[in-house]
């Protein structure tokens, strides 16, 4: 084998090794379930492992060692056996619990914390839970990749002209009412202190909708697009950072 061919083969191997480092390969999730749901999760686990995600499977007795990890996936609903249900109830609302208790219902509930995401995948019984696993596994994988590729961090210092608004309180003419996530987008809910503007429109790189009675505004964006601009009560604002308890806004 001549030296030129050796160099070509070596370069190809290096390239092939580099390109196999796909999204999700370094991700790790804690998978909490009871023995029943664990036995029915083989296809779900295999799918994620083939995508390069490391999975640590635990039951309720060993969960406390991992409960602060970045990604927690819980299989089972609010009444899941072997103490899994009691952990589920700590993360989902009463309304979500009631929904999952209705025969035939199933869903994936995503709960975002400042440094952690919890995914509850459940149904009204073990078979519906298994269906929910397989129906939501692609979405779960995409959401983990998105979180891995962009981590939202608070500013090291408060930018000039900006203010922190804590959830449920008014600062000036704005109040913050939390956020939801869907399909890679974040939607934050804000409320103005006046009633003089309503309708639909857009500003900057965000879309928004206001409602006439004490104007609420829903600002939708990708975290990587921050800061984003919006208008409310004839004033223009810029969202710089948010989490469960506060939002930083510049006016």
Image: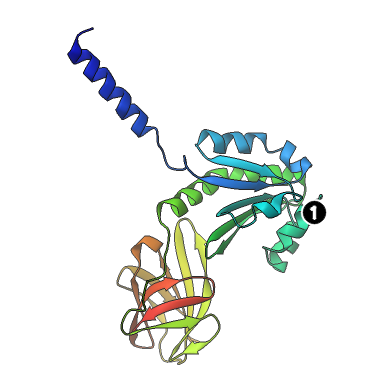
Left or right: residue 228 compared with residue 88: left
Is residue 136 visible to us here?
A: no
Q: Residue furthest right?
A: 81
Of the pair 80 and 245, the residue shown nearer to us: 245
Q: Residue at x 71, y 58 (%)?
A: 88
Q: Quadrant of the C terminus?
A: bottom left
Left or right: residue 45 compared with residue 218: right
Q: Residue at x 54, y 80 (%)?
A: 167
Q: Position of residue 115 (x, y in %)?
A: 52, 62
Q: Residues within 10 Å of mark 1 (few under 14, many from 20)?
A: some
Q: Position of residue 123 (x, y in %)?
A: 72, 51
Q: Residue at x 46, y 48 (%)?
A: 145
Left or right: residue 104 compared with residue 52: right
User: Mark 1 sits on what residue?
Assistant: 83
Q: Position of residue 212 (x, y in %)?
A: 47, 85
Is residue 131 visible to us here?
A: yes
Q: Position of residue 166 (x, y in %)?
A: 51, 81
Q: Secondary structure at mark 1?
A: loop
Q: Residue at x 77, y 59 (%)?
A: 86
Label total for image: 1
Q: Residue furthest top?
A: 1
- In the rendered image, the vertical position of residue 151 relative to residue 8, given as above or below: below
Please say which color scheme the image uses: rainbow
Q: Quadrant of the N terminus?
A: top left
Q: Quadrant of residue 9?
A: top left
């Amino acid at each position: 084998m001549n030296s030129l061919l050796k160099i070509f083969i070596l370069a190809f191997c290096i390239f092939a090794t580099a390109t196999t480092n796909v999204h999700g390969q370094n991700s790790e999730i804690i998978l909490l379930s009871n023995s029943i749901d664990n036995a029915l999760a083989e296809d779900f686990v295999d799918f994620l492992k083939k995508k390069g995600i490391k999975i640590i499977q635990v039951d309720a007795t060993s969960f406390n060692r991992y409960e602060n990890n970045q990604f927690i996936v819980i299989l089972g609903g609010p009444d899941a056996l072997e103490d899994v249900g009691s952990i589920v109830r700590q993360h989902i609302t009463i309304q979500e619990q009631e929904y999952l208790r209705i025969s035939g219902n199933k869903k994936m509930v995503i709960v975002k914390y400042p440094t952690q995401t919890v995914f509850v995948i459940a149904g009204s019984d073990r078979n519906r839970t298994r269906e929910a696993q397989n129906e939501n596994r692609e979405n779960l994988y995409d959401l983990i990749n998105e979180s891995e590729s962009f981590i939202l961090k608070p500013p090291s210092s408060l930018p000039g002209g900006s203010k922190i608004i804590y959830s449920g309180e008014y600062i000036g003419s704005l109040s913050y009412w939390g956020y939801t996530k869907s399909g890679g987008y974040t939607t934050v809910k804000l409320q103005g202190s006046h009633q003089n503007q309503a309708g639909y429109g857009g500003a900057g790189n965000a879309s928004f909708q206001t409602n006439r009675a004490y104007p609420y505004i829903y600002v939708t964006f990708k975290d990587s697009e921050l800061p984003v601009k919006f208008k409310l009560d004839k004033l223009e604002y810029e969202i710089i950072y948010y989490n469960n308890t506060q939002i930083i806004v510049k006016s």
